[in-house]
Image (tube, rainbow, N blue to C red):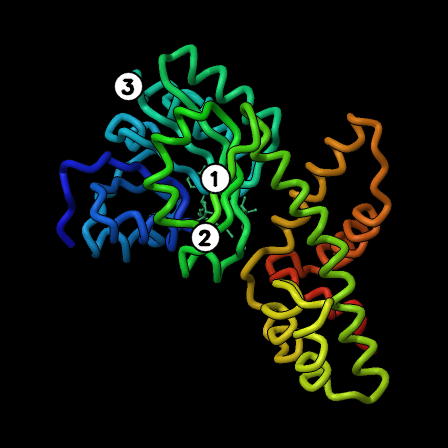
Amino acid sequence: MDTNPQLPRIGFIGLGIMGRSMAGHVLAAGHPLCVYNRSRDKADELVGRGARWCDSPGDVAAASDIVITMVGYPADVEQIYLGEGGIVERAAAGTLLVDMTTSSPSLARRIAEAARAKGCAALDAPVSGGDVGAREARLSIMVGGEPADLERARPVLERMGTSIVLQGGPGTGQHTKMCNQIVIASTIVGVTEGLAYARSAGLDPATVLQAIGGGAASGFQLNVLGPRIIAGDFAPGFFIEHFLKDLGIALGEAAQMGLELPGLALARGLYEQMAARGYGRDGTQALIKLYRH
Ligand code: NAP
């Protein structure tokens, strides 16, 4: 695929379920693209389409105008940004760093400070919309940082998402993502229990979904994950182990604010049972396994 050298050079790190689709949209838009992922094979398809492989996150940063990251956990984010030879150390002054991983607000603030000290800028820009939203470039992107930096990133973010909203300074994108995860946590428990009830009542869950999926209960968890639950398709769109990471961040932040969230704590307890049974690499819809009898 031909790239347009007039467009900003993008570096993309983390090519898993979400990142590989997101990076693919950036490449399709004509940006020169360098990529890195912990397991190299996940970059093969993008490299085949014209992306350039780099051997480390630092090498990606040194070759890019805008660096975008979509890794797994806060520990991964900290390592690639703040570790020795990492993104902040290797990026040239003026580089814009955009972390789209779901990570902690306090780490986002630390990265923004470290970036500023190097003459760079950083945004935290986590997303919602799932594997489907990433594939169809319909993500909702929640941004923390400076308005001028968002305007610089916006043309690239628009390749991946349809809603891009600045929430405030560094860390506020991640806080907003926690609001999203808190809503999802109790919703997926409700969807699961509604479908478990349907089965126990002798109803056809598909017919139930047809009826309630268009009413007040409708939404991503019911309408997208409901059919996967009914089909017994537990492949990860969103790993349970990543959801547990998010619930831990949200409960930790809430505790620091003196806020009790019993619904969220209940959802975490249920997902901890799933992880203890070895289902951490299933998708979140696999919660139905707890209700089988
Ligand atoms: P994923 O499939 O595990 O992708 C993460 C990728 O990052 C993996 O390919 C992993 O490499 C790579 N990686 C991790 N640490 C790295 C490092 N230090 N250096 C280089 N690459 C590294 O997970 P995902 O579902 O795409 O999710 C990514 C993030 O988005 C998570 O924080 C998740 O919570 C969040 N999120 C996910 C969804 C969703 O529906 N899936 C929706 C919104 C937000 P390997 O290939 O070696 O594992």
Q: Position of residue 211 (x, y in %)?
A: 70, 81
Mark 2 within 8 Å of ligand 1, using the beta carbon:
yes
Q: Residues within 10 Å of mark 1 (few under 14, many from 20)?
A: many
Report if the CB atoms under discs 2 and 1 are less than 8 Å apart: yes
Tally of numbered tags = 3
Q: Is residue 77 above or below residue 188?
A: above
Q: Which mark is residue 100?
A: 1
The amino acid type, in three-letter code, at marker 1 is Met
Mark 1 within 8 Å of ligand 1, using the beta carbon:
yes
Q: Provide the residue designation for mark 2.
A: 18
Q: Secondary structure at mark 3?
A: loop
Between 25 and 38, which is closer to the camera in this rendering? 25
Image quadrant for the C terminus?
bottom right
* Residue appearing at x 68%, y 42% in the figure: 179
Q: Position of residue 80 (x, y in %)?
A: 44, 30
Q: Earlier in the sequence, mark 3 or mark 2?
A: 2
Q: Secondary structure at mark 2?
A: loop
* Residue appearing at x 61%, y 32% in the figure: 104
Q: Provide the residue designation for mark 3.
A: 92
